[in-house]
Each structure stands twice: as C-alpha cells, then as structure tokens.
Image (spheres, rainbow, N blue to C red):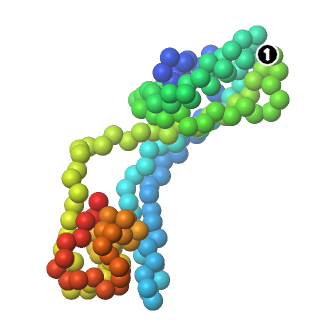
Amino acid sequence: MSETMSFRDFYWPRLPDQVEIKASRRVHALEQPYDGEVLQELGGKGREILGKGIFLGENARAVFNHLAELLQNPKGILSAPGLSVPIEAIFEELKLEGTPRPDRIAYLFHFIEILQSKSVEKPRETIIGKEGSLWVEAIRNHTTVDLLLEKNPWICRPDQLPIGKKLILF
C-alpha cells in the first residue's frame, strides 16, 4: 500500500487526514406487474476514493490551486493510502472546506476509479419466448425494462411482444 498520495503530476505534500475507499455494485429493482419487484445485479462499479485534508504553510494556496487545475483534465493515475496498486481514475470533485487562511486551506476530494473493459462486445440479441413480456425478458437476460425499450424502439406494448421476434439486449 502507498505511503504517499499522488494524482498525475501532483504529489500531496502531506497525506490527507482522512481517506475513504468505497466499493459497491450496481443493483436495480425491477418492478413486476402484479408481483412486487425483483432485484437485478448489474455488475461492479469503480471504487470511490474520498477524503479530506489540510494544506499548510505559506504556499498552501498555490498547492490547492495546482490540485484544482487538474479538474480541467480529470483522467489520470491515482496512488493513495489504502490502494494496493495505483489505479486509473477520474478526479470528480475538489471542495474548499471552511474559511481559508493564507497558511492553511482545508479541502475535500472525490475520485472515481475507471474500470477497464475486458473486450468490446457487439450488441447481444435474444429471441422473444412464449411469455411475450418485456419484464420476463429483462429478468431472463439480467437487464432492465428501460434499457430494452431504449434499444428496441419498435416496442409499443411491453406486455405483448411478438413471440419469435429478435430483441436487442445491449
């Protein structure tokens, strides 16, 4: 694990006081007509790296401004305490906290990990089964009704799909 923190060409002069790494997954509740809802697991999300700290000294403002400039081009490699290896991330937010003084600036930051795609997939298709319902097809193919409607603009009645017709999944 890293004993320093850096993002692109910026190295923190002192470690932030607090660093939080949050990992989560995408989950969607799919409402079933007349039958409650079904939870769908839609895969992983990039980790979020949040924290807060203080820049101290006569150049505190210049250090904060240098970090703020990185928001203009927010992609880069992030190394931080708690990460076993550096990751590719987006610098999402930098916030000034409290009233700054010439020699002391408190700040909050937020990075989001960019997950690397394993391969480029072509659109997947399926054939509508005997149920003929978009809700059933969404559950069967681990996707959402909204996504299926977006990819298949020809659908007028989600509850009455023509059996045997191709349905684009993504």
Left or right: 139 as drawn, with respect to 49: left
Q: Amino acid at mark 1?
A: Asp
Numbered label tally: 1
State whether residue 155 is above or below residue 78. Answer: below
Residue found at the very far bottom of the displayed protein: 34
Residue visible at 37% across and 56% down in the picture = 43
**In the picture, residue 96 is in which quadrant?**
top right
Q: Secondary structure at mark 1?
A: loop
Residue visible at 55% across and 24% down in the picture = 70
Residue that numbered label 1 is attached to: 103
Q: Is residue 143 visible?
A: no
Residue visible at 46% across and 34% down in the picture = 89
Q: Is residue 12 visible?
A: yes
The spot of residue 68 in percent (x, y) is 62, 25
Quadrant containing the C terminus is bottom left
Residue visible at 46% across and 77% down in the picture = 31
